[in-house]
Amino acid sequence: MIPSSQVVDDTSKNLNLIANERGAHLAVLPFRLIRHLQFTVDHSKPYRRITQQHTGLSVAIQPIHTHLTPMADTNSSIGVERDSVADRSVTEVVVVRHGETDWNAEKRIQGHLDIDLNDVGRQQAVAVAERLSREFKISAIYSSDLKRALETAETIAARCGGLQVTQDPNLRERNLGDLQGIVYGDAPTMKTKAYMALQSNGRDVEIPGGGESLNQLYKRCTDSLQTIASKHRGERIVVVTHGGVIRALHERASSGTGHRSGRILNVSVNVLHLSDPDKWAIKSWGDVSHLNGAGYLDSGFGGDRMSG
């Protein structure tokens, strides 16, 4: 972390902040310094006032129209314009969970079963699509071939230049075997063996009825994302997938860091950087600031390994 005294000194010399209704653009401050700052924005003022939380720096800034994106390592809406990733050896992967389904709302286990978005889920898809359309340029969009993910991805594609969505079955949710179609609360009595397998901490325990183990899910989806990312170095791409898959991707990217995934909410935005040789990093996680009035499931059901 850069010392506070140096931050204040450098900022007083270099800071030229301009903002619009969604946040601020750091036009002059060097990126090596930007990544160490966290800001709060007072939206009640005619001229936005940004306060740097660690130093107490407060700067009044004038509005201007610009494209914005979350900064690395934060869930802020502050960002820097660009058309591609600055480091040409890195792929920036925006991982999005699909919108809500009726089965999510019912706490019914989906797994590989092909369930449509509900009306709330479609509103959520529009909200995340609008957000991504205002951020950095997207070069490609990939999706699970299950309808709840594919419709979310197609909504994003329509608002991001009409990109074609590439379907990848390896991005599907975990196959939960005999538990699929069962309300989670009924599983212990209706499908006891399958439920016990789901609750098991064993990485190689497969769920009865053709279900996958955690290791099988992990290998399937991490191999898939590694292959996808290798095709898009220096670019920003979107991957729309499922809660169980996103938890596995988080496990791969957070190895040894102690970073916890938390609940994976519908249409949450999670940004990873992948680079050679096989290096993964989490840049931001679990951002649902774009939802506003669209609503989402506070329980995050469907976003953890216990539910599918």
Image (spheres, grey):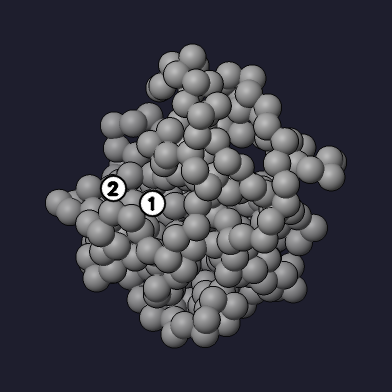
Residue at position x 61%, y 60% from top? 66
* Res. 224 in view: no
Of residues 218 and 57, the one drawn nearer to the viewer in this rendering: 57
- Measure the alpha-carbon separation of dots 1 and 2: 7 Å
What is the three-letter code of the residue carrying label 2?
Trp
To which residue does mark 1 refer? 272
Residue at position x 38%, y 63% from top? 84
Residue 201 appears in which quarter of the rendering? top left
From this view, report whether residue 267 is shown above or below residue 279. below
Mark 1 element type: strand
Comes first in the chain, label 1 or label 2: 1
Given contact means CB atoms under 8 Å apart, are the residues at marks 1 and 2 in contact?
yes
Residue 190 appears in which quarter of the rendering? bottom right
Q: Position of residue 299 (x, y in %)?
A: 66, 47
In this picture, residue 185 sits left or right of residue 110: right
To which residue does mark 2 refer? 280
Q: Position of residue 300 (x, y in %)?
A: 62, 49
